[in-house]
Amino acid sequence: MPHLSTYVGLADHSEKTLADSLRAVAEGHAAEADVFHTCHLLAGWSDAHRERLRPVVERYGEDDSVTEPERLHADGLAEVRAGQVGLLRDLQDLHVLATLVQTTWTVVAQGAQGLRDRELLEIATSANAETSRQLSWLNTRMKAAAPQALIVDPAR
Amino acid sequence: MTDRIADIWGERTPHAKGTVWPARVDLHLDEGVREEDVEAWVPSACVLCSNGCGCDIAVKDGRMVGVRGRATDVVNHGRLGPKGLYGSTPWASSPDRLRRPMVREGGRLVETDWETAMGRVVQESRRLLEENGPLTHGFYTSGQLFLEEYYTLAVIGKAGLGTPHMDGNTRLCTATSAAAFKESFGADGQPGSYTDIEHCDAIFLYGHNMAETQTVLWARILDRTRAEDPPVVVCVDPRRTPVAEEAERTGGVHLAPRVGTNLALMNGLTRELFERGWIDEAWVAAHTIGVDDLRAVVEPYTPEEVAATCGVDAGDLRRAAEIFGTSDNVLSTVLQGFYQSHQATASAVAVHNLHLLRGLIGRPGSGILQMNGQPTAQNNRECGADGDLPGFRNWNNPRHVQELADLWNVDPLTIPHWAPPTNAMQIFGYAEQGSIELLWISATNPAVSMPESARIRRILGSDRCFVVVQDLFLTETAQLADVVLPAAGWGEKTGTFTNVNRTVHLSEKAVEPPGEARSDLDIFLMYARAMGFVDRAGDPLPSWNSPEEAFDAWRAASAGRPVDYTGLSYDKLRGPTGIPWPVDEEAPEGTDRLYTDPVFPTDTDRCETYGHDLVTGAAVTEQEHRAMAPNGRAFLKGAAYTPPHEEPSDDFPLLFTTGRTVYQFHTRTKTGRARSLHEAAPDAWVELSTTDADALGISEGDVVRVESPRGTIEVQARIGQVMPGAVFAPFHYGSWDLDGLAPDQQHRQANELTMTVWDPVSKQPYFKTAACRVTRVRAGDGPAPAPTTAASAPPPARRRAVPPTAGGGPTTSEVLPETPTYPNDPAAGTSHPAPTRTIAGRS
Ligand code: SF4
């Protein structure tokens, strides 16, 4: 099952990228108290998904050798942008990363169903549900930030 | 002559379950004024807490000289508490009232006339609108204006300017109450009634030291708990309050969870209901959605698990759950111990869940009272000066927005509904970043009341933001303003307000305001006219000029919404009692309790919000809401406990929590100017447990330094009754009456230590979860200035070392031989032996 193991690896990798990026945004925009606390909280969710996935990774092996899906690996946010518009752009980037995580879980869940791997199916489904909540928060926060950032941000 | 400083709740009038609460009329007049000297009694209600006790203002020689409780009012049946009695009127004739407008000249505030002061505001406002549009404007109001003033400001902000940046001090005191209602029931609105006290078998008080925050309501409870068939009281509070003592007296439980762990405790109680089968399955199936998810969320919270997290006894938790699960009728009340603490909305919603699981709602004795802190906070929520849309409308629902656009005759796109309303913390954040450049603050004092005071002072004092303050006095906030506008206060203007029990009172003008002071309504209208706001027909916006016209406009705005005022008028409110909304054709005399049907306003087209993720605050979308098809059923929503944002560490090993004392209100603008109240609690203090005090070598009255990562205070220590590991400080004490001291010696403001963090759903800041350390500085000159009469009392073993708090001015108190008839009272018609004793004090 080379491709399922690739996708299990991708799930693990993209969750890590998302968690790291959430933490980078939390620290970079720490003056926004809600962004600071919520991004740390959501990063913890991604950590927990990886933790639960670990036995599965051990079972299937995390296959990074297949070259083709390599292109799917997204880079995380190395550093954040300044100001309100910067925050908006960073939240957008997080949204892209979380979307990759979510579609990955969807694909993994399909594979797990095919293999009747109940453990993996349960992990993929519950992680997917929490990724939805991460995405909802990012959406909500972007909506709240947008008018002020686009119209009156003093750094514009 | 009763000293109501020493005797906070007054004489008991115990009565049997299911009978009407007897009437007792309390009165206080200024020294030297006799009852027969009073020239006029002007009807109103007290504005020194959210209880809204009906009263009449005594007027003599054009001055307010005292107050008398109204025997016929449904809220208080004639009673008043110490704050209402002593604090209602002295501030009005205080020599330091603001009499003329002021503007900043060369760094100093100097007196000027209205034309100059308002001219500056308008000039700045116009300039900013031209340069950057309405998002440069922010408004921060209060929980102390009148309904007419909130609604007028809401229309100015939403239809005139078009800014979403409008909030009030209500965010600090009552936002969680509103948010929790919206999440569970679809819209704001207090389900229960005070009359539930007379009919319940158990009363749960969650983070609510009612004995100090709403003294008259507590007197109402004491009149049942001291009767022969008392309800059982359960108290959730980290301090040993009078409520906790009453819990023990009535065979209930005092649960003292570690600060910041409320939600774990609530999840534990909820799990017990499931485990023990104390669920009304049929009712739950018919009237709620979400029970399976809730069961799954609370599953891990076994009593032992909760005991470990919260530091409570597992047996006590089981006992509390049993009281809730097996009493026929339960009343729950909730306040700041939940609202201003970690996971606020989720914890408040958990109280609803308990009631919904047993179907304990909508009938006498089974009610929920999510309380408010401030007297008119309710109107801020209703009228939309807190950012919400007026009439509990949903900013996410285009039809609701269109209704308002039609009402005001403006383009719906003017009305800021493209994003969630900006909460107070975010408004100050935008001002800090420089994108809000005009901040208008009315009748509140954020320099003392908001968290992390140093930051708030920096924002208000900065040159980047033009600050307008309208108030009664030159408060700590006003001192930082660019323009200060003198306002008329309670008794100096006419308007209505609504208490926490949905009861609407008309407060009539009794005297003229001092100097050139004007009502807040007149000030807002003066700005609107000077700015030339008009509707699509070119007519002035707002379209009214007087309080009564504003009230009638509001009635129209409320029509058909859950908060329906259409059946009310100034004339109707001139009757013997306040009237609880909704008042419409179906309920022309008002409504004692909601959800008797029980149909909840959760329908997608009717609700005030589609709801949120209680953990992250993420908004539920319209499609998601519609897919759930709530159709009048209430939501059961759960959330997992997460540890607080700041936990004790080696450097800061204790937990800092703030709160109130019985004799002071808010930042003492009024109560600090009343002799009896001031002397009862003249200065700040902190409370430590005996254990911590002993370990730190601190004795009663020692001056201690309390430090958090954000600031420091130095005050005297009371060895008190907080739980070990916790430090309590009252938040009332700023610097306005410390004239003799240099600013660097004024170290007593509790909010110097609190942190900038808020609830993800209600956006209410958390005042009760900061870490701190305490060190002894020196011996004090006597005991701490903390009252001994309530929760700040020393523990019993140490009580004798501290003189008891007393010394209030004379008051009278008379139990009426015949209890009046109260409209809507479910016990009406029941007779109970009328108390015949005349209570001490009546000469
Ligand atoms: S309980 Fe509240 S409203 Fe009633 S008199 Fe006291 S302060 Fe005033």
Image: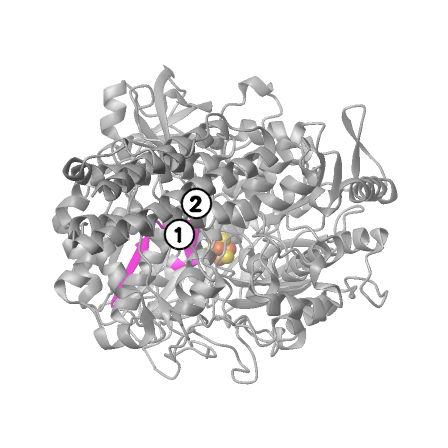
Q: In the picture, residue B198 is in which quadrant?
A: bottom left
- Front residue of this view, candidates B463 and A45: A45
| Helix, strand or loop status at disc 1 | helix
Q: State yes or no: Cβ of the residue under disc 2 lies below 8 Å from any atom of ligand 1.
A: no
On the question of residue B507 being in view, the answer is: yes
Q: In the picture, residue B158 is in which quadrant?
A: bottom right
B339 lies above or below B648: below
Q: Amino acid at mark 1?
A: Thr
Dot 1 and dot 2 residues touching (CB under 8 Å): yes
B774 lies above or below B720: above
Q: Is residue B209 magenta?
A: yes
Q: Position of residue B693 (x, y in %)?
A: 27, 24
Q: Which residues are magenta?
A: B201-217
Please give the residue where the numbered disc 1 appears in the rendered image.
B345
Q: Is residue B434 magenta?
A: no
Q: Is residue B300 left or right of residue B65?
A: left
Question: What residue is shown at x 53% (from left), y 59% (from top)?
Answer: B378
- Front residue of this view, candidates B535 and B690: B535
Q: Residue furthest top?
A: B778
- Front residue of this view, candidates B797 and B97: B97
Q: Position of residue B495 (x, y in %)?
A: 66, 63
Q: Amino acid at mark 2?
A: Asp
Count how many numbered circles sit on residues in the image. Answer: 2
Please give the residue where the numbered disc 2 appears in the rendered image.
B759
Question: What residue is shown at x 30% (from left), y 62% (from top)?
Answer: B353
Q: Position of residue B514 (x, y in %)?
A: 76, 47
